[in-house]
Amino acid sequence: MNGAQVAVAALEREGVDFIFGYPGGTIMPLYDALFNHAVRHVLCRHEAAAAFAAGGYARSSGRVGVCCATSGPGATNLVTALLDAYMDSVPVVAVTGQVRTDLMGTDGFQEADVCAITQAITKRNFLVDDPNQIAATLAEAFALARSGRPGPVLVDIPTDVLKAQVTEGAAPAPPPLPAAVPRAPDEAVRAAVAQIRAAQRPVAIVGGGVRAGGVEAFRTFVALLGLPHASTLMALGAADPDDPHALGMLGMHGLKAANKAVQRADLVIALGMRFDDRVTGKPDRFARGAAVIHADIDATEFNKIIPADVILHGDLRDTLEALVAELVRSQVPRFDAWAREAQELGGPLPSDRVAEHVLSATDVLDRFFAAVPPEAIVTVDVGQHQMWAAQRAHPAHPRHFLSSSGLGAMGFGFPAAIGAQFANPGVPVYAVVGDGGFQMCLPELATLRRYGVPAKVLLIDNQNLGMVRQWQELFFSARYSATNLADNPDFAAIARAYGIEAFAVADPRAADATIAAFIAHAGPALLHAACHPTENVWPMIPAGMTVDDLMEARA
Amino acid sequence: MTCDLLLRDARSVARIINLAHRFNCRCTRIDASAVSGATTASFAFDGPAVALTRLRAQIDRILAYEAPAGARLPEGTP
């Protein structure tokens, strides 16, 4: 076997069924090994889309997503999506071709030092210079990607190493690497429970850490206490959809009840979340009167933004189970009255809906989320539609709502939906995108077409880079610099040119029927919703401010 | 703040220096040598206390990601 065959065998051993990629010179030996192989290659139309698709595959399944690209431009095109996976703790392994070993360092054709480039945005990366190390390196890469706080790992293999014959036996199966999992000490668990028992107004904030197997434990924990709880963007779906104590999304465009309840809390129980600035606003004024219990698997997060009174360093599911076990050792406190009070701090979502004959993006999304089946997976891109969707979606599980949350990478939503559909072939998958982000990945319509992927795209077209336009309106004296997209193309015609069924709606009276037809369509489809151009996202807490500065409408 | 580290991957020395720069800390001493496949590295950093704390946490994360071979030597801390 040569190095490439060993690599593909290693991928197969890791349970890889799909690898998203784009071929090129130095990665050709790997593509040759993939030819007619059980590990299926999915040809995307851009390496960035391939890496986002791998992320969508991983986010929606919990399994490691795999992408590959050639050296130089192929590898550098992966960078944004690798950072996206790093920021949102998504297990991804990227395999890149590298120029021949003897050309490395000579500015060879399509040479890039991708290990140096990605050192700050991967958990680790590896340059493999010995074909006998390929199998062991890939095993370590997968173990590292999925262990602890998950994240991306890159394996760079020179083309001559991929071609070379393995001498030390054919594809040796390396032993599985043990994954060290920290466990919150009993003393810390007892201290946390003491804080909970002493609290009058506790609020849990659940974050992306819950995605790694902690959803049921979280639901058990909050139900046991009758605890009001808010969610970060990453954890939408962690709450049982029927949980009356769920306050919804927290943060800049979060729901009023969630933001106000956290601000009034005397105890914040932070579960697998990292106090991102889009959540805290101004950290020294965030939940000023609250003690903080912080549970996370990554010790780096403790005391980084918000000081913690009790630190629970461990896997979130284990930590939650330990908290429940400690709580039930004596009478369990209940916080139902406070939870009801917290819920009443909210109200209907404010909106900018305009005249009845003009389609409103929020109206379209209200109707869309009322119509999609409960088991659906929804991906979003980045911008106004992302926040409107996050406010309105009721996902059954965090793996059913996929967003580039930490990085906020436009161009994520559509390829992520493709990856999610490959990981979940029987599940309806929808990408909700804006007209800006969709144009960053339009060629992926070809990927939908080639593989008959039934994922659907709901395009909220307000002919603007809407979120930037909103900030220009509110904070830059309405000087609309480079945000107008009034010259958008005919998106439905583009979809049809790729062989994708297209629906279009511009009249609110036709919205329900068109959305129903779009959802009922058996294959891939685009729904183009031509929406009012200046609708804003409300509520909004301006950057660096607090819930006291919450805006619900234009001044 | 001083850190005496045993690194599996010599490139982590560069990563740590870059992190210090990003965290508004100053690297005042670097001693590094490769010994039988591992690298011993000794650093001293100056900077705001909060930045040094974050830097220390990030260094610990680098070491953790180097596991299982990663290990930390006894160190002097502020």
Image (cartoon, coloured by chain):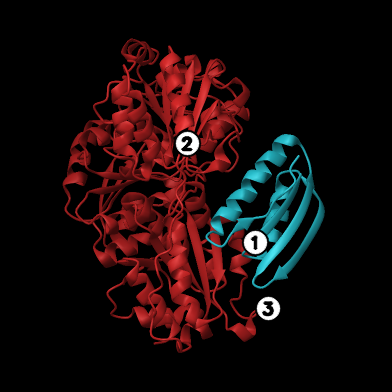
Chain colours: A red, B cyan
Residue closest to the eye, A206 or A104: A206
Mark on residue A105? 3
**Secondary structure of residue under mark 1:** strand
Judge from the rendering whether residue A495 lies leftward or rightward of residue A233; answer left or right: left
Q: Position of residue A209 (x, y in %)?
A: 42, 41
Mark on residue A329? none
**Secondary structure of residue under mark 3:** loop
Q: Determine if residue A454 is in view.
A: yes
Which chain does the residue under circle 1 lie in? B
Which chain does the residue under circle 3 lie in? A
Judge from the rendering whether residue A84 lies leftward or rightward of residue B27; answer left or right: left
Q: Position of residue A231 (x, y in %)?
A: 40, 31
Mark on residue B7? 1
**Secondary structure of residue under mark 2:** loop
Q: Which residue is mark 2?
A: A185
Q: Position of residue A5 (x, y in %)?
A: 38, 82
